[in-house]
Image (spheres, coloured by chain):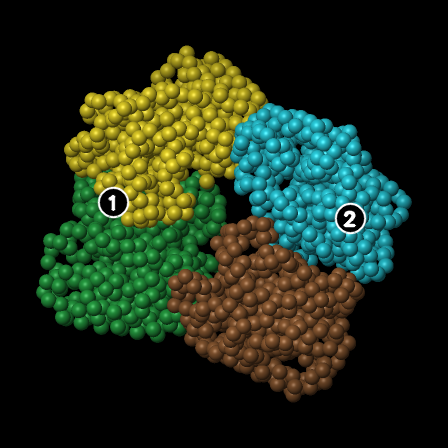
Chain colours: A green, B yellow, C cyan, D brown
Amino acid sequence: MEKTLEKSRTEDHHLKTSSFPFTRTELIKKFEEVRAFTEQITDPLEIEDYVVQVAEHASPAKWHLAHTTWFFETFLLEKELEDYDPIHPQYSYLFNSYYLQTGVPHCRARRGNISRPTVKQVYEYRESIDEHVLNLIKDATDKQYEEWAPIIEIGIHHEQQHQELLMTDLKYMFSQNPLNPVYKEIERPKAKSIPENSWIKFDEGVYKIGHKGEGFGYDNEFPRHKTYIHDFELANRLATNSEYMEFMNSGAYEEPEWWLDEGFSTIRDEGWNSPLHWIKVDGKWHQFTLSGLEKIDPNDPVTHVSYFEADAYARWKGYRLPTEQEWEVASETVPVEGHFADAGYLQPIALRSEKGGLQQMFGDVWQWTQSSYSPYPGYKPLPGALGEYNGKFMCNQYVLRGGSCATSKSHFRRSYRNFFHADERWQFTGIRLAR
Amino acid sequence: MEKTLEKSRTEDHHLKTSSFPFTRTELIKKFEEVRAFTEQITDPLEIEDYVVQVAEHASPAKWHLAHTTWFFETFLLEKELEDYDPIHPQYSYLFNSYYLQTGVPHCRARRGNISRPTVKQVYEYRESIDEHVLNLIKDATDKQYEEWAPIIEIGIHHEQQHQELLMTDLKYMFSQNPLNPVYKEIERPKAKSIPENSWIKFDEGVYKIGHKGEGFGYDNEFPRHKTYIHDFELANRLATNSEYMEFMNSGAYEEPEWWLDEGFSTIRDEGWNSPLHWIKVDGKWHQFTLSGLEKIDPNDPVTHVSYFEADAYARWKGYRLPTEQEWEVASETVPVEGHFADAGYLQPIALRSEKGGLQQMFGDVWQWTQSSYSPYPGYKPLPGALGEYNGKFMCNQYVLRGGSCATSKSHFRRSYRNFFHADERWQFTGIRLAR
Amino acid sequence: MEKTLEKSRTEDHHLKTSSFPFTRTELIKKFEEVRAFTEQITDPLEIEDYVVQVAEHASPAKWHLAHTTWFFETFLLEKELEDYDPIHPQYSYLFNSYYLQTGVPHCRARRGNISRPTVKQVYEYRESIDEHVLNLIKDATDKQYEEWAPIIEIGIHHEQQHQELLMTDLKYMFSQNPLNPVYKEIERPKAKSIPENSWIKFDEGVYKIGHKGEGFGYDNEFPRHKTYIHDFELANRLATNSEYMEFMNSGAYEEPEWWLDEGFSTIRDEGWNSPLHWIKVDGKWHQFTLSGLEKIDPNDPVTHVSYFEADAYARWKGYRLPTEQEWEVASETVPVEGHFADAGYLQPIALRSEKGGLQQMFGDVWQWTQSSYSPYPGYKPLPGALGEYNGKFMCNQYVLRGGSCATSKSHFRRSYRNFFHADERWQFTGIRLAR
Amino acid sequence: MEKTLEKSRTEDHHLKTSSFPFTRTELIKKFEEVRAFTEQITDPLEIEDYVVQVAEHASPAKWHLAHTTWFFETFLLEKELEDYDPIHPQYSYLFNSYYLQTGVPHCRARRGNISRPTVKQVYEYRESIDEHVLNLIKDATDKQYEEWAPIIEIGIHHEQQHQELLMTDLKYMFSQNPLNPVYKEIERPKAKSIPENSWIKFDEGVYKIGHKGEGFGYDNEFPRHKTYIHDFELANRLATNSEYMEFMNSGAYEEPEWWLDEGFSTIRDEGWNSPLHWIKVDGKWHQFTLSGLEKIDPNDPVTHVSYFEADAYARWKGYRLPTEQEWEVASETVPVEGHFADAGYLQPIALRSEKGGLQQMFGDVWQWTQSSYSPYPGYKPLPGALGEYNGKFMCNQYVLRGGSCATSKSHFRRSYRNFFHADERWQFTGIRLAR
C-alpha cells in the first residue's frame, strides 16, 4: 500500500481565485532554500546510507532525493514544456510514488533493491531539474507564471513533507543497525523540572474550523466550515516520558482493558512493550536518536507512540484524546511557535517555560487526535493526476495535529492535517490529553 | 480478532435511572419468543450444517446457539445465583466470544474444529439455561427483578444480533458449497419497475442525534447530543442491482480513480469484480441466496457490497455516502417501517411503492455511512466485564444504519449504530447516496 | 499440496503378466471385508464427528468414506461401464483427492467446509457403489474379470491406506477439542519391564531388495534390484517413551547441535518440545489417544515424532537412523508379525517378549529411515490417470518402513514403502536406531 | 533458514593423518591469489552495488567480503592467537553466517539493512586480517604451521565458494533493477551448430565413489565407498536453450503430468514459465546476464533452472536425471576440463568441439542429479564449531555435480558435491540427461 504523506495538493478555489502571492524573486528564493535544505539533511551521510530500505514504509534517502525531483519533472516540465526531454526514460517509473494516472509506479517495497542510478547520478538529476525549473520561472510569461507558480509551490511543500519523512526514515534505518550509527551529534537543552499537568477549559458552541484562505494549504483543509463542539478541557502540555513510564510500569501493556481491540492484537502480535526506538541497556531505558543511543530523559515529551498506545494511555489516565475540531479551536488561542525542524534538535524537547496556559501546541511531536481522517463537508477532489489521490487515503487513518521537531516551520499552518494508521509510530508522534 | 457485532450493552444512565419498563409476564414472553426464534432459524438445518465454519468471521450455527446461551449463564446465572453449578466446566471457555474479563476465550478461528458437544447436547444446554432463567424471573424479589431484568433484556438483544449473524453465516457457509444447497424455498415479491432516483433536501443547522431515552439502547447510542449539519440531499431510495451493474460494466473495478487506496488494493488482492455471492452462470449474473442460486433481479437493492465498493460507486456516480448524522436526522422524517427479518424474505426486496419521499430507510439492507465508528461526545464505558469491550471496537470500522432483511424489527431502533470493517460484505449491506 | 498416502497403484508388469490370483468369490469376500472395516472404524462416531477438518492434512471422516468410494466409481464404473450414470455429477469433483487427469479436484484445505452431502447420503453413495461393484464382479466375462479384478484390488488397498489415515485423522481431530473426547475405550496390555537395547549385526555385500513378485505391491516397490550395503547394526527394538524423555530432559530441544538445520527451524517456529499429542497435566506428561488422555507409559514405543525428531534423537544417542535398504535386508531375517490394526489397540504396545533377536520390526509404529523417497533403478510410471501421480511425490519425503498399529495386516508386505515429509508426525511414526 | 553453500569443512582423517602438502610460500601464494580474486570480482562495482540485498538468499557483496574475512578471524586468529584484539566487537555478530556455536548470527534476511560498516571499512577489515594471517603463517612454529595450515586451506576454499555466490548474487541483484545494469562487457565465443544428443553407455557393477584422499576435500565427499550401479547411459552433452524452448513451447509449464507434485505447485504459485533471468522483449526471449540483457542463443546450455524444471524436462523427453553415483562413475572417463570461472565468460558456452564422447562434464553449469543430499556410509561429523553444521543441511536438498562457469578450477575436484533445494535456480544450474 502506498504511503500516506504524499498528500500534496492545492485547494481548488484557492488556485483559481487568488492571484499568486509571491514574486519570481521570492519564489526562486523559496525554491532554492527548500531544495538546499534537503541536501543539508543528507550531508552527514555516507554513500551506503543513501541506498538502504529497512522496511516498506521507510524509503531510501536516494529515493527521496529523486522522488521530490521527479515531482517537478512530471507535474511541471513534462506537462508544460513542449520539447522537454527526460533525463532518463525509466526515472518516471522508478521515482513515482503512487500517482497511478502518471503510470504504474515501481513497487514501494523494492526501493532498496536499486543500486543504480548511483547517488552521484541522483544529485546530477536534481541539479539538472533545478536548472530547468529556475529557467522556467525566469522565462515564463506573466500568464505562464500565474499558472506555473502554484505548481512549484506545491512541489516545494511536497519536498518539505519528504524532508520530514527523510529524517524519520533515516532514523529508522540507523536504528536497525546493531552498530547504532550516529547521524549527527546534537546538543539539546534540558529541563530540571517541568510544570504539572493542568487543564484549560473551552466552551460549548458552534465554531469554524479549516483553512482561512490566507497562504498555502492542502485541499483537505478546505472548506472552512462550522462544527458543534461540546464543553471540553485540554491538557496544558504534552505527556512526558516519565508519565508514560508509569503507564508501562503499571503493567498496562499486558492488560486488555486499556486497549482498543485491534490495539491489543497489535501489541501482542508485534511484541511491543514500550514506544518505538526504546531499548533497555543494563536495565535502564534508552532511546535511539539521530545522535545515537541516549538515556531516556523523564521530562521530554514521549514520542514514537502509535495511536493505539496514545489512546490506551489516555484511557488508563481516565481521560481521552482530543478530536481534531477541539484541537484546532483550542490552538487559535496561542501563536504558532515551538520547536520545529528549524531548531535543529531532531528530538522533542522538555518544556522549560513556567508560564501558565496552553503550551507545546506546535512543534516537538505530532499530537494524535481521536478523529478518523475524513473529508470536510463540501470537500471537492481536484481534477487530473495531482488530485487523483485526493480522498484516497481518507480511510482507516487518524488525524495528527501540531507539527513536530522534523517539520519545517515554513511548511506548517494551524489547519494542517497530518494522518497515519493507528499502528504507525516511526514518525515523531506524541500525546496531548483531553477530557 | 474478535468480531464486532458483539456490542450488546446497556447505557449507563439508562440502567440506573429508569425503572424497568416490562412486567415479569411481558419479559418472559419476550424471552421465550426470541429464544424460540433462534431455533426457528436453525429448524431447516441438517446436523452437519450446524458444525461447519468456513471462515474466521462466520461461526458455526452450533456456536451461535451455545454462545447466546452462555451469555445468560455467565452474566446472570453464574454471577447472581450463589449455588449455580455450570452444566459443563469447559463451556465457559468454548462459548465465550471475546469477553477477556470472564476468561480467555477459545480461538475464534477454530470454532469449526469442535465436533463435541453435539448439536443435541447444545439444545439440552439451551433448555437447561432457559429453565434457570425463567425460574429466576419468577422467583426474584422485586429488588432482584429490577436488577436482573435489564441484564436479561441485554441478553435478548444480544441473541437478536446473533440471529442476524446466524442467517448471514449460514448463507456464507452454504455459498461455499459447490452443491449450492437450499436453506429454504422462499417466495419473494417482485416489482416490474421502480421509481427513479430523486433527491430529498435537508437544511443546515444544529440538530440533536442519539437515543432519546425511551426503550432499549446500547451505550454507543448515548448520550443524545447536538451536531452541526450542513445542507445536504439524500437519495429517495436504495441503489439497485441494475444501477450497480452499470458501475461494474463501465470497468470501474479496473480503474483506480474511483477507489480509496486501501479499497483498490483489496479488490485487486481479493480478485473482486462484483458484490459477494454474485456468480456468472452461462454469461448471466446470478446470486447465491438462502433459497439457492437465483438470477439477479435488476430492481432489487444491491447488497453484499463492502464500504470500499459503496464508496467507489458513490464517487463514480458523482455523489457520496451520507454521514451517520445526516442519516439519522433524515430518518426522523419517516416512520420505522420496512422489510425486516419478520417479513421472512431473507433478501432485500424491490421498492414497489410509487409514492414520493424518502423510501426504504429501514430494513432490506444496512446502509453504509461515511462515518468512522467513534464515541459520541460524553460517551462513558460501563464498569465490569459487560462493559470491558465498550469502546474497544471504535477503530477502523464504519457505521451502518437502518437495519436489514435479517434484523428483527423488535430489535431495531432509529438510533441503532451497526459497524463493520471497510472490507466486510457478508452482511446484508447496501447503498444510499447523498450529495 | 496433495497428500502423499494416496500412492495406491499397481506395478506395470505385475498387472500385465500375472494372471490374477483370486477367484471371484475370494475377491468379493476381500472387498466386502475391507469395505465393512471402514464402517466399523466410523461406527463409534456422532454425525458431527464426520464433518470436521482441523488441518489441511487431516480430512473429515465423511470425505474418507466418500473418496474411497469415488475411487471405485472413477477408475472402474465410469471407465468400464458404458451406460454408467453417476449418482451425483459433483461428487467426482468433491471427492477426488489429486488425480489431475480425472478433473480439477476440490481444494484439499476446504474439505471441512462442505456440510452436504450429509453423512446419510454418503453412506447411501457407498451402498450404491458397492452394489455396482459386486454386480460387475459377478457379471464380468472371464476376460473382463482378468482386466477389472486388479483395479478392484488396487481400490481395496487404496481403501486400506485410507483406513489408517482415517484413524490418525480422527485422533488428530479429537485432540484439538479441549473436551478430550473418547473415541473408544480400549484395554491395552502393559509391560513391567522391557529388554535392554542391544545390537544385531549384518554383513557388507550386494543384496537384493524390492518386491519379489508374489502378491500385491505398489509400483514404487518394483523392480527388485541389487544394492550394495556396508556393515551395519540395527537396534533390537524400538525406542521407548522413557528413552525419548531422557532426550527431552537433557534440553535437546534447545540445542541446535543435534538437529538438521530445517529441523531446528521447525521446532523453534512450531514451539515443539515433545512428540505430538503429548500434554503436561499437573506436571506429568500425558498423551492424547483414541481412548482419551492417558499417562505416558515409559515402556511403550515412542510415537508421533517427526523425521527431524527421530534424526536428532539418533544423533544425540551417538547413532543414526537406518537406510531403507538396511531395514529391508534386516527384515528378511524375521517373520511379518506384530501389532497391526487387527489387534485393535490403536496405540503402540510395550515389548513383552524376553527372547533375543530383532523385535518389533512390524506393526506398532512406522520406522523412519534416513532414505529420501526416490525411484528404484528401472522404475517405470504407469500410463493413464492411475499412474499420473506415480513419481510425483518422490521429492522431499522420507521413507518409513514396517507398518503400524493402524495398518491392516492384509494390506502390509515387507517391501512396503510409506513416506512422509520430515515435519509430519500425526501418523503413528517411531524410531529404530542403527549404527 | 541459513543458506546451504556454507558447507566448508575438512574431512576428519584427512586433517589428522596427512602432513600438510604445501610449503609456507605456496600457501601464502594461494592465499593471496584467492583473496585478490575476490576483490577482482568486486572491482567493476559502484559503492551502491555493495550494499543491496534483493532476496534472503542473495547476500550483499559487502557481506561476502566481510564474511570470508570473518572466517579467518574467527576460526584462526581468535582461536589461536592469545592476545588477538578483534577489529570491531560487533563484526563477529554481523558477519557470522550460521555457525551457532560461535554465537547468534545477525538475521540473514537483514544483511541489506546495514549501511555501516562502509565499503571502505570492510576493505580495511580485509587488509588488516590478511596482514594478521600472513604474519601468522610466517611466524608459526612448524608444529603450529601443521595445525594452522589446514584451517587456512579451508578458509581459502570457503572464500572460493563465496566467490561463486558473489557472482550469482550480483547477477540476481542487477537483474532486479529495471535499468538492466551491466556488470562488465564480456565477449563470448559462439557456435554455429552443435553435436546431436547421443548416449554413452556404462556397465552394471560395484563401483567406488568419493574422494580418493589426494588433495583437498570437504568431509561430505568422504569416505570413499562401494556402491552398486545398474546399466545406464548418459547424454553426451548438456541440454541446450533450443531443446528447452521446445519443452516450453509444448505447453509443458501448464501440464501437471510432467511435474513432481511440489514442482507443479511451485511453478503455479511463482508464475514460472521459463528459466530464471529469461525475459520476453518484443516477443523474443532474452536473458539477463552479467553483461546485460542478451538474446537467447539456442546452442548455449540452458541454465538457471530448478530441480523441478530439470526433472520435468527429463520426464517430458522420456528420460531422467542421473544419480550422483552414476555421474561420478561416468566422470572418471574424462579429464577435469571445461569453462570454469577462470575462463571469465560468466555464462555457459555452446559446445564447439565436434569430437565424440562425453562432453561438458565440467564447468559451464552445475548438473542436477536425482540424488537427495545425504551422508555417505560411514560419514562422521567433525567435533567443534567448524563441524557443527556438518550434516545439518542433509535434508530436502539435491546434489549437483560438475562445477560451473562461476566456479574456480582450483576449487573444484571430481568428487565435489554441491547441493541446493529443488526450487532454487539463481545459481548456474543446468541439465544432463540419463536413461
Q: Amino acid at mark 1?
A: Pro
Q: Is residue B420 above or below residue B292?
A: below
- Nearer the observer, disc 2 or disc 1? 2
Q: In the image, what residue occupies the spot 53% across and 78% down? A: D344
| Element marked by disc 2 | loop
Q: Is residue D298 above or below residue B14?
A: below
| Element marked by disc 1 | loop
Would you say A396 lies left or right of D340 here?
left
Q: In the image, what residue occupies the spot 26% across and 51% down? A: A388
**Residue D166 visible in the picture:** no
Label 1: which residue? A375
Where does residue D233 sit, x and y in percent of width and height? 69, 64
Q: Residues within 10 Å of mark 2 (few under 14, many from 20)?
A: many
Q: Is residue B324 above or below residue A102?
A: above
Residue B162 badge: none
Q: In the image, what residue occupies the spot 62% across and 50% down? A: C392
In which chain is the residue bearing label 1?
Answer: A
Q: Is residue A323 above or below residue D349?
A: above
Counting labels gives: 2
Label 2: which residue? C211
Q: In the image, what residue occupies the spot 58% across and 53% down? A: D259
**Cα–Cα span, label 2 and label 1:** 75 Å
Tell me the quarter of the picture where residue D413 sits: bottom right
Say which of A289 and A55 sits in front: A55
